[in-house]
C-alpha cells in the first residue's frame, strides 16, 4: 500500500457508528476508522451513569447494617481491617470466633493483640474496609460501607466500559441497570469481603485499556492528518508515547492484585491484548508488515506502564507491614541474615518475599486441599448458578418471635446468589459473544469474552480445594456487558427495520431481571419471611 498524496481527494463512505445507524463522512476511510469512538455528549453520558450509580448505591445501602453481627468471612476481614488501623498489620485476636465475634459486634475490640497473624490475601481490600471502620466505628455499618461504595462504583465502571465498547449510551445503561439488580453483585456489596473491591478494580482497569485503544487510534489519525497522509504507506509511523490510560490501568490492576492475586490473569490477558490492538491500529493505518514491530516498539512501553506500575503499586500496598516490626513473619530477614534473599534485597523485602512464599504454599498446599465446606461449588456450575452460598441464616423463628406472624416458622437469610434471569441469559450471551468475536470479527465482543474467561477458567485449577460461587463476582460484570452488547444487536441500528420489536425484546429482558431481583430480595437482604416463602424462592434443590 503506497502513501496517499496529501492532495488526493478524500474517500467518502457510510461508516459504522455502533448502534446509532450509518452516516456519511468526508473524512478519508482510514482516518475515519481510526477515529471510531464514543460520540454522545459527555454531560448526558455521565449524567445517566451517575443516576444509575446512585440508584445502585441506594439499593445497596438500605439495611446494610443487618444482620447486626459478623457474618461469614467478615470474621477475618472486618477484624483484620481494624487491626490495620491500630497496628499497620493484621494482628491476632485472643479467643475463638464464637467468643470474639459477639464482642466485636458489641463494640468490644479488647481481644486484639499486637502479635502478627498469618493472612492469605494482600492488604488493599482490608485497608478499604478499614476506611469505613475509621469513619463510622467498629460496627456492621462501619465495616460494610466501603463495600457499598465499591458496589456502586462497580456499576459505574460497567456502564462506562459497555458504553465505550458499544458506542451506545443505551447499551451502557442496560448493562448498568442489570448489574444493579443482580443478586450476587447486591450481596457482595453489603458484606466486608475482598471480592467486590477486586471486581471493581478489574472492570475499571479493563475500561482504562479500552479507553487507551480509542485514545491511541485517535492520536495516530491526528498525527497522520497533520502530515497530510491517508496511509502510512508501509512505514511504522510516529511513535506516540503519551498513553495516560495505560498508566491508569497499571494503577488499577496493581490495586486489584493487591486485593487478590488471581487478578494477575486479567493483567496478563489484557496486557497482551492492548499491544495486539496497537498492531491492528498500525495495520489499519497502512504500516503493512511493519505493524508487527509494534510488539516491541509499543510492547516495551506498555509493559512498563502497565506491569511495572502495577508492581510498584502492589509493593507499596505492603507499606504498613514493611514500616512496622510486628507483622507475621516480619522478622524473618533479621533472623536469617545469611540467607541469599536478605543479601540481595535487604531484610525487609526478603521477609516480604518469604511471606509470599508461605501464602502461596497455603493456597496450593495439602492443608487447604484437605478442607471441606457444605457450600463448596465446582466452577463448572458457576455460570449457571447451580450452587449459591448461604452467607448468614437465622432459621426456626417461632410465631410471635422477631415479628414472625405465621403458623409456619420464619427465617432470615442472606444468600449469595445471582439473579437467575441475568445469569442464564448472560451465559448464553457469552457463547454468542465468542462466536460474534471470532466469526464476526467484532473486537468489541472479544473484550467481555476474554475478561470473563480470564476471571473464570483459572478457577478450574483450584477445583481440588473448596471454592465458592461468590468468587464469580469478578465474572458477572463482564458477562453482563456481553449480554448488553447482544441486546444491542437485537435492537439494531437507529431507524433500522425491526428496531421497535428489538427494543421491546430488550426491554422485556431488562424488566425480567428487575422483577426477578424484586422476587429474590427477601433472601438477599435478611428480610423476615416464612419458611415456605423461602423455599418458594429456592427454585433448584442445589440452591438450598
Image (cartoon, rainbow, N blue to C red):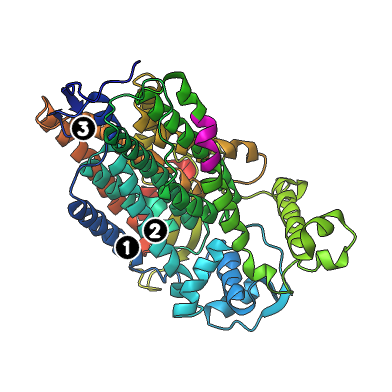
Q: Is the residue 341 above or below the residue 233 in the image?
A: below
Q: Is the residue 507 above or below the residue 145 in the image?
A: above
Q: Percent x, y for residue 514?
A: 26, 49
Kindly report which numbered mark, 1 or 3, lies closer to the viewer in this rendering.
3
Q: Considering only order in the chain, which callout, 3 or 1, is on the residue closer to the N terminus?
A: 3
Q: For mark 1, does the 10 Å Cα neighbourhood hold few (<14), some (14 to 19), or many (20 or more) residues?
A: many
Q: In this picture, which residue range is highlighted in magenta? A: 294-301
Q: Nearer the viewer, residue 81 or 272?
A: 272
| Residue found at the far right of this picture | 338
Q: Is residue 51 visible?
A: yes
Instruction: Specify whether 457 is left or right of 5.
Output: right
> What residue lies at 52% left-to-right and 65% top-to-bottom?
71
Q: In whole angstroms, how far apart are the C-alphas of marks 1 and 3?
A: 32 Å
Q: Which mark is residue 151?
A: 2
Q: For mark 2, does the 10 Å Cα neighbourhood hold few (<14), some (14 to 19), or many (20 or more) residues?
A: many
Q: Considering only order in the chain, which callout, 2 or 3, is on the residue closer to the N terminus?
A: 3
**SS category of the residue bearing label 2:** helix
User: Is the Cβ of the residue at disc 1 closer than 8 Å to that at disc 2?
Assistant: yes
Q: Percent x, y for residue 9?
A: 17, 21
The residue indicated by pointer 3 is: 17
Q: Percent x, y for residue 410?
A: 40, 63
The residue indicated by pointer 1 is: 57
Q: For mark 3, does the 10 Å Cα neighbourhood hold few (<14), some (14 to 19), or many (20 or more) residues?
A: some
Amino acid at each position: 500500500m503506497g502513501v496517499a498524496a496529501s492532495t488526493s481527494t478524500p474517500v467518502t463512505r457510510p461508516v459504522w457508528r455502533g448502534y446509532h445507524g450509518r452516516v456519511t463522512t468526508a473524512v478519508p476511510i482510514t482516518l475515519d476508522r481510526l477515529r471510531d469512538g464514543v460520540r454522545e455528549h459527555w454531560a448526558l453520558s455521565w449524567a445517566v451513569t451517575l443516576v444509575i450509580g446512585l440508584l445502585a448505591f441506594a439499593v445497596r445501602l438500605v439495611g446494610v447494617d443487618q444482620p447486626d453481627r459478623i457474618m461469614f468471612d467478615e470474621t477475618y476481614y472486618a477484624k483484620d481491617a481494624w487491626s490495620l488501623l491500630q497496628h499497620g498489620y493484621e494482628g491476632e485476636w485472643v479467643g475463638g470466633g464464637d467468643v470474639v465475634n459477639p464482642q466485636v459486634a458489641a463494640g468490644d475490640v479488647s481481644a486484639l493483640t499486637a502479635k502478627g497473624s498469618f493472612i492469605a490475601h494482600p492488604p488493599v481490600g482490608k485497608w478499604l474496609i478499614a476506611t469505613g471502620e475509621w469513619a463510622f466505628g467498629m460496627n456492621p455499618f462501619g465495616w460494610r460501607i466501603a463495600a457499598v461504595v465499591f458496589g456502586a462504583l462497580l456499576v459505574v465502571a460497567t456502564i462506562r466500559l459497555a458504553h465505550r465498547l458499544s458506542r451506545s449510551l443505551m447499551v451502557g445503561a442496560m448493562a448498568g441497570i442489570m448489574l444493579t439488580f443482580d443478586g450476587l453483585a447486591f450481596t457482595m456489596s453489603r458484606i466486608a469481603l475482598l471480592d467486590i473491591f477486586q471486581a471493581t478494580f478489574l472492570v475499571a482497569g479493563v475500561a482504562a485499556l479500552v479507553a487507551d485503544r480509542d485514545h491511541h487510534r485517535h492520536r495516530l489519525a491526528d498525527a497522520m492528518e497533520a502530515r497530510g497522509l491517508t496511509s502510512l504507506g508501509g512505514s511504522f509511523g510516529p511513535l506516540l508515547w503519551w498513553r495516560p490510560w495505560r498508566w491508569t490501568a497499571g494503577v488499577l490492576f496493581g490495586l486489584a492484585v493487591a486485593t487478590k492475586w488471581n487478578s494477575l490473569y486479567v493483567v496478563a490477558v489484557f496486557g497482551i491484548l492492548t499491544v495486539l490492538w496497537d498492531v491492528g491500529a498500525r495495520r489499519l493505518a497502512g504500516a503493512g508488515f511493519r505493524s508487527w514491530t509494534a510488539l516491541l516498539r509499543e510492547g516495551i512501553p506498555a509493559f512498563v506502564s502497565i506491569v511495572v506500575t502495577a508492581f510498584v503499586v502492589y509493593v507499596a500496598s505492603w507499606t504498613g507491614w514493611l514500616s512496622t516490626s510486628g507483622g507475621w513473619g516480619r522478622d524473618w530477614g533479621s533472623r536469617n541474615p545469611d540467607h541469599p534473599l536478605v543479601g540481595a534485597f535487604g531484610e525487609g523485602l526478603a521477609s516480604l518475599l518469604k511471606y509470599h512464599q508461605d501464602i502461596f504454599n497455603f493456597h496450593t498446599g495439602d492443608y487447604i486441599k484437605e478442607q471441606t465446606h457444605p457450600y463448596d461449588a465446582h466452577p463448572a456450575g458457576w455460570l449457571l448458578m447451580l450452587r449459591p452460598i448461604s452467607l448468614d441464616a437465622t432459621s426456626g423463628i417461632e410465631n410471635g418471635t422477631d415479628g414472625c406472624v405465621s403458623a409456619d416458622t420464619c427465617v432470615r437469610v442472606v444468600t449469595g446468589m445471582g439473579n437467575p434471569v441475568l445469569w442464564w441469559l448472560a451465559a448464553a450471551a457469552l457463547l454468542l459473544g465468542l462466536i460474534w468475536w471470532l466469526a464476526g470479527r467484532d473486537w468489541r465482543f472479544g473484550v467481555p469474552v476474554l475478561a470473563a474467561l480470564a476471571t473464570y477458567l483459572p478457577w478450574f485449577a483450584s477445583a481440588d480445594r473448596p471454592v465458592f460461587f461468590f468468587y464469580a463476582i469478578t465474572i458477572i460484570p463482564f458477562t453482563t456487558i456481553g449480554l448488553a452488547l447482544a441486546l444491542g444487536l437485537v435492537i439494531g441500528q437507529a431507524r433500522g427495520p425491526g428496531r421497535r420489536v428489538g427494543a421491546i425484546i430488550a426491554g422485556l429482558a431488562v424488566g425480567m431481571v428487575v422483577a426477578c431481583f424484586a422476587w429474590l430480595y427477601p433472601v438477599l437482604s435478611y428480610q423476615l419471611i416464612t419458611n415456605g416463602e423461602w423455599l418458594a424462592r429456592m427454585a433448584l434443590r442445589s440452591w438450598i
